[in-house]
Structure formats: C-alpha cells, structure tokens
Image (cartoon, grey):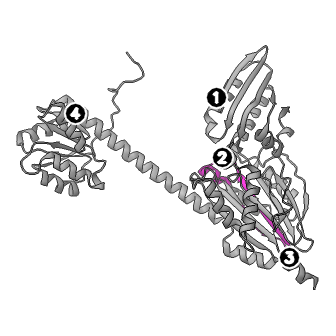
Amino acid sequence: MSEYFSPAAPVHISLEDTRVLVVDDNEDSRLVIRAFLDAAGVGNMDFAIDGAGCLEKLEVYKPDLVLLDLMMPGMDGFEVLRRMRGDPRYEWLPVIVETGLDSASNRAKAFAAGATDLICKPVNGTELIARVRTHLEKTLLRKELEASRASHREAVRVAQKLQESLLPPAGRLNTVAKVYGLEMDSYFEPSEAVGGDLWGLHLIDENRLGVYAVDFSGHGVGAAFNSFQFNAQLADSQMFREDPAAYLTRLNQLLHPVLQRGVFATMFYGVIDCDKNNITYAAAGITRPVLGGRNGEDLTFLDSSGVPLGILPDTHYENREASFDPGTFLFLYSDALLETSAEKETGNGMIGEQGVVGLLKDALALADDQPPLDAMMGAFFEMNQWQQLEDDLTAVWIFNPVKKKAVNDE
Amino acid sequence: MEYLVHDDEGTKEVILKGQLTFADHESFGNIIENVRSYDGKECIVDLENLERVDSAGLGMFVLLRDMANSKQLNMTFRKPRGQVMRMLEISEFHTFLTIEP
C-alpha cells in the first residue's frame, strides 16, 4: 500500500542500558514478562508486587518504563497511575498497563488515569515486546533530544556571554564620556539564537573618539564567531583608526578571504572630533544612523550606504562629514529595531525607519535631560509585545551637550 | 518566500514573491541549484513581487550572483521596489549586480 510509512521499520536502538520496572502481584506473570523482556533485549529489570512497592521502587530504581498490572490487592494500578502523574518527576515516564479488563470504557479509564499504553491479559509475547520496544526507544530518543538541546542552549549561552564581553561595559562608557565631555548610553539585547552585533569605542587622542557598530548577517553561533574574529581584526587594523574610510577598506580586505560566501558585515565607523564638533565617518551598508537635536528637532539620517564588508575583495570606502555641534546627538542602532514586527502601529508589519524616528522623538520628550534609550526600548518592547527578538538589538546614544561648549567659550 | 522558475525563449526567469529572509535559506538553495543546471546565457531575477529582504536574503543574492559569474551567465535583477530597493541601494549592490528598474 503506502510506501511512505512503514511503522514496523526497526530502528534497532540498543535497550541494553534501559531499566524496566514490572509491577504485578502474580509470580507466574512476573516470570513470563521477565522472559519476554529478556527477548526484547531489555538490559535491566526490577519487580514490585503491589502499588506501594511500585512507588518506592520508582524513587530508587529510576526506571525508563513501567509495566503495571491494574488489578492488585491494596493500592490498585489506577491509584498508582494517579499518584505518578501528580508527581512532576514521573510526568513523562511511560507506563504500559496490563489488564484483563478489555472493555472500551475500562481502557478509556486507564488512559484517563495516565496510562501511556495498554496491553490485555493474557499477555501476548510479540505484542508486549513490540510495545515495550516502541516506548523505550521513544524515551531514549527524547532523552537524547533533551541532552542535545541542553548542550545547544549551553553553546548559545556561552556565545552570548562572549559576545557581550566584547561590548564596552557601562562603567567604561561613563568614564570615556566624561573624558570627552560627552553623554553616552548603550543598550544590547541578544536574540535567542545569538546575532552578530558588535560595537565599541577607540580613544584616538584627547579630542577624537572613534565609535564603531557592526552587524554580521545571519544568526546563530556562526554569526557570534564571526564577531569574535572581527574583534581581533579590529585590533590588527588600529593604525587606520584615525581615517574611517581607510579603516573600513582594510577591514574589508581582512574579512573577505575568511568569511563564508553569502555572509557579510555592515558597519559604521565615525571619528567624533570634540574640538571641531564634527564627525568624519565611513559606512558599509549599515542601518542609517540618526543625527539630531536633543529637543527632537532637525532629525536627519546619515548616508550609510556602502558595499557591506566581506562581499568584494577590493571595495574602497569614502569619508563623509557631518557637524556635531553642541546640542546634537548621534544614534546608532542595529536592524533588529527596524525589522521587528509592529502590526498594530504600522499596519504593514515592520517598524521601519519612520517608526524608529517616532520612537526616538517620543523618548526624547519623555526622558527629559536623561539619555532616551531606556524610554525608547521600553516603548519598543511594548510595540513588539515583549516577544523574543529574532536578531540582536544594539542601540548606542552619544550626545554632545551644550554645557561643554559654554565652558570652552569661557 | 514563494518562487517560480521557468525558461522562456533562451532566458531563465526566477520570480520571487513575499519575504526573503534567514528562514528561506533552503528554498533559495534550490533556486541556485535550478539556475546552475541551466545551459542558456541569460537569467532574470524578477523582484517586483518581493516585499522584503533582510541581510541574510541579501547574502543569498550574492550567492546567486557568484554562481552566475562562475558559469558566465548574464544575470539581471529586475524591478526591485520599496524596502527591497532601499536595501539594495544602501548596500550599493548596483556596483556588482545588474539591477534594472
């Protein structure tokens, strides 16, 4: 008939290390079942002769499967099942009940009490072996899957930690801000899968501060590893830090041969000159940074177009200029901010650049004299309905306060 | 993303529809293999009905272009619009892809 589905196809998982607990008050039955389990290849067995004995053995023997007789003197199988299913430790433990009660309503009662499967007495050997095998294999596969998920979660957690360790800690940010007479704040929220966001600062001299933001395409541990590698390449290129275009050109040369095809990094690197109140920057196709007044006026997008790093071997970048007068802020953000669903607010799905500007303006008004990132991210997650992000979210706020200018004028 | 691929008088046409994102890696791989097995000289990638592309999607365009270059296939990306056009512009893909309005 159907060639697609063949339930009898043997998986041949070894049951050598599995443990089965047989609960039956009849000694002959226990002997027969032992013989069948031996034939099935079950490596370990233990026996209980009543319900109370079963509950005791569960704790010490820790079986992978229980074969439970429903009709026993004292605590019967139904009560044992109910107690087991009420205990989170045995919630998923497969229990095959054996019963002489083969009417439909009693079967339903056994399943309602928490039986995983049911076999009628007198026990048919072939049927018992098939059912035991099925449930033990399922248990083994579930355990394997859980272990593999746990190890994946751990790998992702380690990658997230490492990635976060590459970002400037809040304390350093405050110190640097003070040195340059700026106000700075940042926000980083890793996605479940680990994205490839990275940002940081280069202290060039007493007046000039370099700021970079990088976003690797793709997600997962691979993207995180790309950002670790990139961190080393940043260090190898430090002689170009004063010249953003040369810096990006160099980084592209380093990245191109080592990045997997189809993977690339978008980047912004700007040198803020606190003496001349300007920013010289180069960009490689990153989300457009916003420049504007702290009062929420004159918000403009910087031109961040450029071929992303790693695509072509010989891309040359250009320097662009923007004024960074006192009272002006620079806002950098990763594309997770743009590409997050906000069905209710936008009607067409994504927050987009106009949505970002809206969020920023509202936050500037709300945050008074404080950096607006907390207010902005609060509003963002409300929009997003607190869903887990699909990509890393990075936001960096750098403000050139008016006060500094007044001091300089004196 | 949904896609349609067909040959038309010596030209391979790939029509993309919907959103091309990280999740489409596998089906885009099928498109690349399909175009790879094509013996003609022209290929058009129709983007008119593509509503959105993310950075992973742009990476897939690069892979498609690499494959086309490797077998001297002329590839044209046609009619990008909206967010797709903005993504191609900001990434300056016109410097290494043939993009037609």
Q: Position of residue A211 (x, y in %)?
A: 79, 65
Which residue does the image show at 63% across and 36% down from the upper left? Answer: B24
- Which residue corresponds to mark 4? A129
What is the chain identity of the residue bearing mark 1?
B
Q: Are marks 4 and 2 on the same chain?
A: yes
Q: Quadrant of residue A202?
A: bottom right
- CA distance separating discs 4 and 2: 47 Å
Q: Residues within 10 Å of mark 1 (few under 14, many from 20)?
A: few
Q: Position of residue A228 (x, y in %)?
A: 66, 58
Q: Residues within 10 Å of mark 2 (few under 14, many from 20)?
A: many
Q: Quadrant where the C terminus of chain B lies?
A: top right
Give, as a single range, the part of the protein colored magenta: A199-226
Q: Are marks 2 and 1 on the same chain?
A: no
Q: Residue A203: within the magenta?
A: yes
Q: Are marks 1 and 3 in contact (CB under 8 Å)?
A: no
What is the chain identity of the residue bearing mark 2?
A
Q: Are marks 2 and 3 in contact (CB under 8 Å)?
A: no
Q: Which mark is residue A402?
A: 3
The amino acid at mark 1 is Asn
The amino acid at mark 2 is Gly
- CA distance separating discs 2 and 3: 40 Å
- CA distance separating discs 1 and 3: 57 Å
Residue closest to the far bottom: A410
